[in-house]
Image (cartoon, rainbow, N blue to C red):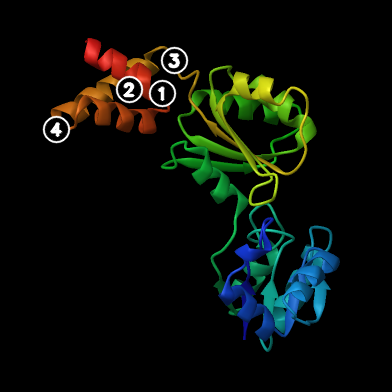
């Protein structure tokens, strides 16, 4: 039969797809992180299914067993919210099914990192997803240094009580978007610099947070000049200065206004 990876809502129950609901109704078994949470979701849509708890503490043991069952049964894999495997359990089960020759079908659907990336307004051409950053030590230091130096957009999960610390460790002018409680009643997306975001959330906050960061702020003093030179090339190609500056801004992570001012003043 098959293993079907089924994304579930990250907050708003209306975000589940018709295909996901049909798959859950047709499944012989639903493997989920928390049977109570998934049970409530299924109950909301009038679906009754056998559930098995499959989480980070038992996935190594259960993956071979579920892969074997998937030879003759249709198993749906869900996480508590969003798309399984993205900072959630499932990798071992998917790998076990592939190795066993079991069909693996993946449904598109809700994903907090993708939703936050699109909402951020930051460049999405080169993206690095880290999940939760290390809390301390050399790995954390290396991550912060990499973000400062690399012109990529970084997507991270962060807890409310560590958000201020992370924002404070980033270069002050780093462009960020703090996406909080996505798709829920109290959704908030704050866009600005790391310093501005740190001030905005200085009094603390609550909820689930995705932090989107434009890296490369400390890439060197030539960063702006490189962006302006890129804009000049686009003008030569026929773009207007305004469009050239906007295009160079998206690709460099620099502000459009500073590129435009330098471009038209040169």
Q: Quadrant of the N terminus?
A: bottom right
Which numbered tag is attached to residue 238? 4
Residue at image x 48%, y 25%? 216
Residue placed under numbered mark 2 in the picture: 227
Which is nearer the N-term, disc 1 or disc 4? Answer: 4
Circle nearer the viewer, 4 or 3: 4
Could you classify mark 2 by the number of other residues whose Cα lies within 10 Å: few (under 14), some (14-19), or many (20 or more)?
A: many
Quick check: 75 above or below 188?
A: below
Q: Is residue 78 left or right of residue 148?
A: right
Distance from disc 1 to disc 2, alpha carbons, whole Å, reads 7 Å
Quick check: 132 above or below 106?
A: above
From the viewer's side, name the closer residue of 248 and 154. 248
Residue 193 placement (x, y as % from top left): 56, 23
Residue at image x 69%, y 36%? 133
Circle nearer the viewer, 4 or 2: 4
Residue 241 placement (x, y as % from top left): 22, 25
Residue placed under numbered mark 1 in the picture: 254
Distance from disc 4 to disc 3, alpha carbons, whole Å, reads 29 Å
Q: Is residue 4 left or right of residue 66?
A: left
Which numbered tag is attached to residue 220? 3
Which is nearer the N-term, disc 1 or disc 3? Answer: 3
Residue 121 placement (x, y as % from top left): 47, 38
Residue 253 placement (x, y as % from top left): 43, 28
Circle nearer the viewer, 3 or 2: 2
User: Can residue 138 be seen?
Assistant: no
From the viewer's side, name the closer residue of 52 and 62. 52
């Amino acid at each position: 039969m098959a293993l079907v990876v089924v994304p579930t809502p990250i907050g708003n129950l209306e975000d589940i797809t018709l295909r996901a609901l049909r798959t859950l109704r047709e499944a012989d078994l639903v493997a989920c992180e928390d049977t109570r949470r998934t049970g409530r979701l299924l109950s909301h849509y009038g679906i009754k299914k056998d559930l098995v708890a499959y989480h980070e503490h038992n996935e190594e043991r259960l993956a071979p067993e579920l892969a074997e069952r998937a030879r003759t049964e249709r198993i749906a894999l869900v996480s508590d919210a969003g798309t399984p495997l993205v900072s959630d359990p499932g990798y071992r089960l998917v790998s076990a099914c592939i190795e066993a020759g079991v069909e693996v079908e993946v449904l598109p659907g809700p994903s907090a990192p993708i939703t936050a990336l699109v909402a951020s307004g930051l460049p999405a051409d080169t993206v690095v997803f880290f999940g939760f950053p290390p809390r301390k030590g050399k790995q954390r230091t290396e991550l912060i240094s990499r973000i400062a130096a690399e012109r990529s957009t970084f997507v991270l999960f962060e807890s409310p009580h560590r958000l201020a610390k992370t924002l404070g460790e980033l270069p002050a002018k780093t462009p960020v978007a703090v996406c909080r409680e996505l798709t829920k009643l109290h959704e908030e997306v704050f866009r600005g610099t790391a310093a501005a975001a740190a001030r905005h959330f200085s009094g603390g906050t609550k909820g689930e947070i995705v932090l989107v960061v434009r890296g490369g702020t400390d890439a060197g003093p030539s960063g702006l000049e490189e962006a302006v030179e890129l804009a000049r090339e686009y003008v030569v190609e026929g773009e207007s200065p305004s469009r050239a500056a906007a295009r160079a801004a998206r690709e460099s992570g620099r502000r459009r206004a500073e590129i435009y001012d330098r471009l038209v003043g040169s």
